[in-house]
Image (cartoon, grey):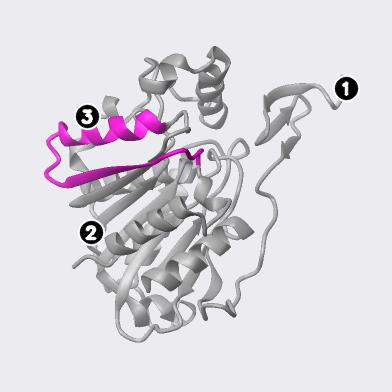
Amino acid sequence: MSNEELCYDFSPMIKAYKDGRIERLLGTATVPPSTQPETGVQSKDVVISQQPAISVRLYIPKSAATKLPLLVYFHGGGFCIESASSPTYHDYLNSLVSEANVVAVSVEYRLAPEHPVPAAYDDSWAALKWVASHFDGTRKGGEKEDEDWITSYADSQRVFFAGDSAGANIAHRMGLKVGSDGLVGVKLIGVVLVHPYFWGSESIGVELNAPAAMREFMAAMWRFVNPLSSGSDDPLMNPEKDPKLGKLGCGKVVVFVAEKDVLKDRGWYYGEVLRKSGWNGVVEVMEAKGEEHCFHLDDLTCENAVAMQKKIVSFLNQV
């Protein structure tokens, strides 16, 4: 058997070969934590767990002094590419932390297919429990030394989750888990979902006119990262099918969608089903005209990216 025989081809993201080799085509570059000269935002990496391997990249703004809102961020990449230390997300978090004046925790979760879903959810929940442990009185003396940025600067009563694409899917799931299981020590105020990666077996909106190959790509991608899933109507992928949707553990959600993104109507539909779920919070959906999926990560200075960032900054600083 040739070692070039493909088992899965999800170009331009990832390829899997029959000999077990995985080739990531995007999102493999990394940059170290730093102090950004332009903004003064500082970052550092902290290992939470060796087995499984879970870490976070922490960010504090230049003016960190009093207690600031705490943002926990989950990167995108279809559950199978990218990282918290990629230049894309490092630049984005530097920009957002500077403008919003928040403390941020960017989660490095394990990737599929080597670590299939639900590993990403499990790791993200472990990271959230680690964050909460700084406030719930369970940590022991000396244990906090490397995490003093959280204890010194983060307000445990003003916590937000955010993510883009698959990271938005994770942010949603973590919000549900807070609602069902609780997270002692912190108060989740709101969740930011940017171009969320949701799907379903029945096409809606723009999906109805999408090429069949595109619809199959989306369904097959989910099976690739979560082989044991029931399919596109798995509640992990289709919130409408989740009987616990109304348990979302925050009072405010903002969803961003992009006009030219095949996932656009899933974001709009999420707002609809959330309102009808019995959840007693407020959800807002905003659409960027003329834009593609995760356009803002390619150019943080374009007009629509600036408008989205302004909205997120306002959301993170609500009283």
Q: Is residue 55 magenta?
A: no
Q: Which residue is mark 1?
A: 2
Q: Which residue is mark 3?
A: 243
227 up-or-down from 167: above or below: above
Q: Which residue is mark 2?
A: 189
Residue 136 image position (x, y, % from top left)? 26, 70
Which residue appears farthest toward the right when viewing the image? 2
Q: Nearer the viewer, mark 2 or mark 1?
A: 2
Residue 39 image position (x, y, % from top left)? 52, 78
Q: Secondary structure at mark 1?
A: loop
In the image: residue 307, left or right of residue 53: left
Q: Residue at x 51, y 54 (%)?
A: 302
Quick check: marks 2 and 1 in contact, CB under 8 Å? Answer: no
Q: In terms of depth relative to the viewer, which is nearer, 7 or 118? A: 7
Task: Count residues near mark 1 (Cα–Cα under 10 Å), then give few for <14, some for 14-19, many for 20+.
Answer: few
Disc 1 marks a residue whose amino acid type is Ser
Cα distance between the residues tagged 3 and 2: 22 Å
Cα distance between the residues tagged 2 and 1: 53 Å
Label whose residue precedes the other's in the sequence (3 or 2): 2
318 up-or-down from 199: above or below: below
Q: In terms of depth relative to the viewer, which is nearer, 177 or 35? A: 35
Residue 296 image position (x, y, % from top left)? 50, 51
Task: Count residues near mark 2 (Cα–Cα under 10 Å), then give few for <14, some for 14-19, many for 20+.
Answer: many
Q: Is residue 283 magenta?
A: yes
Q: Secondary structure at mark 2?
A: strand
The residue stretch that appears in magenta? 264-293
Label whose residue precedes the other's in the sequence (2 or 1): 1
